[in-house]
Amino acid sequence: MSGEQGSTGQTKLTGQLSLLSVVAFGVSYMSPSMVVVVFGVVATTSAGTAPTAFLLATGAMLLTGLSYARMARLHPGSGSAYSYTRHFLGAPAGFLVGWTVLLDYLFLPMVAWLVQSIFLNAQFPAVPVWAWMLMHAVATTMVNIVGVKVADRVNLLCTSVAVFVSLLFIGYLTTYLGHHWPGSCTAPLWNAHSEGFGISSAASVAAYSYLGFDAVTTLSEETRDPERTIPRAVILVLVIGGLLSTGTAYLMQLVHPGGLFDDPEIIGYTMAAQIGGQTFADWTNTADLIAGFASVLAVQLASSRLLFSMGRDGVLPKRVFGRLHPRTGTPVLCLLFTGAMCLLGLDMSLETATSFINFGAFLAFSAVNVCVIAHYLRNRTSPRLGVAGHVVAPALGLGVTVYLLSQLSATALTIGSCRLAIGFGHLLWLTRGFRRPTPEMSLDDEPAATGHVEKEAATPA
């Protein structure tokens, strides 16, 4: 059982996951093969310097990752940016961040299922996309309902396949280059066509490959020693993802110098056929689908934990979202709700579906960076990193995320702004025009987090 029993039912998750399990969830969430999917677009935008764009994106995301690691140590809890913002910037701000992130988390499983279903339909056209979506939603929902231990084992297995395929792809790239060396090992990093604006624009695209590293913080309550494990997991996920993405992009850019492609969206598949033959390309595509299942599994698990956290706080109906199943210890109704979201994507294009996400992610990144700055300015509790680590670094991270937010399409910005406005209206209704307090964290969660912050505050600067 992964939950604790209270007088009114289970409302507390318990720690079972190790550092390896949490890192595996984070890596699978980001999907190791994502670099192959977006390589063509990044290489085209950066004029053939995709690895530089991925390296820049890694550094940019690490700035925000350090802020998440800091917050996870100060305030362990399953709500991620939502919980951090409530605790350090106030309940109304936390509500708005949580509301916007919640909608992202609700749409993310739908988008992930849709992507998987499109690929499967391309390989098995006799089965329509909507049928694949339903099968995917049922499969991942059932695995997550059974319990976090089962989900952990399935995820570890699928993530192992994903990492193996990524390493195998790197091996084939290296072997191919041994027989077809392009002549210059620095051109993928900088060439005659390179320019700062193009690389920064490409980095904003590459940054989407790292969305999801923050999802590991939603597993805080189900992780052993979360104050140490979660911060380490956040950084490890980003470092592993950055090394895989940058290294793979560098080798792919050597195999195909420059940024001109017949079809940049399928360059990963065509390059796999080029370096390993058609059989290898088909096998890699199938293995990527297994990796995609792990990604969807992790996405749905993280989404359900955020729903549970907000339901337990009373922001969402507590009787529906704030309870755990007495036998499995999982938020079953939250998982069923996220599973039902696939119905919205049955007749939706991928372009339309993706316009619903990312706004909330970058808003959350910005809020967490502000939380670190606010905590430091209030307490001055940094014996090691001081202003550089708790003001300068998060300020740079804030600048990066605001820039990435500005790079979203007009459709995404409009949808995100409307969602934020609706959330503000809901907050006004909940608080009766701010005459009532915003629903606070449950008493079961406050002592540990508050006590830790007070301990930090007592530490001399």
Image (spheres, helix red, strand yellow):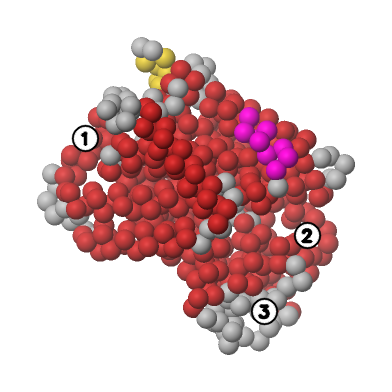
- Give left or right: position of 375 versus 201: left
Residue 97 in the image, given as x and y percentages of width and height: 40, 42
Q: Earlier in the sequence, mark 2 or mark 1?
A: 2
Instruction: Tell me if I can see residue 430 in this picture.
Output: yes
Q: Secondary structure at mark 3?
A: loop
Q: Is residue 379 above or below residue 312?
A: below
Q: Left or right? Give the position of 238 relative to 459.
A: right
How would you rate the neighbour count of disc 1 (Cα within 10 Å): few for under 14, some for 14-19, many for 20 or more? few
Q: Nearer the viewer, residue 87 or 298?
A: 87
Residue sitting at 47 percent across and 69 percent down?
A: 56
Mark 2 = which residue? 281
Instruction: Kindly identify which residue carries mark 1.
Output: 451
Q: Measure the C-alpha gap from mark 2 to mark 3.
A: 20 Å
Start-end of magenta stretch: 340-348
Question: Viewer-proximal residue, 166 or 342?
Answer: 342
Nearer the camera: disc 2 or disc 3: 3
Q: Residue 75 occupies which quadrant of the picture?
A: top left
Q: Secondary structure at mark 1?
A: helix
Which of the numbered marks, if any, corresponds to residue 423? none
Residue at mark 3: 257
**Disc 1 residue type (three-letter):** Gly
SS for tag 2? Answer: helix
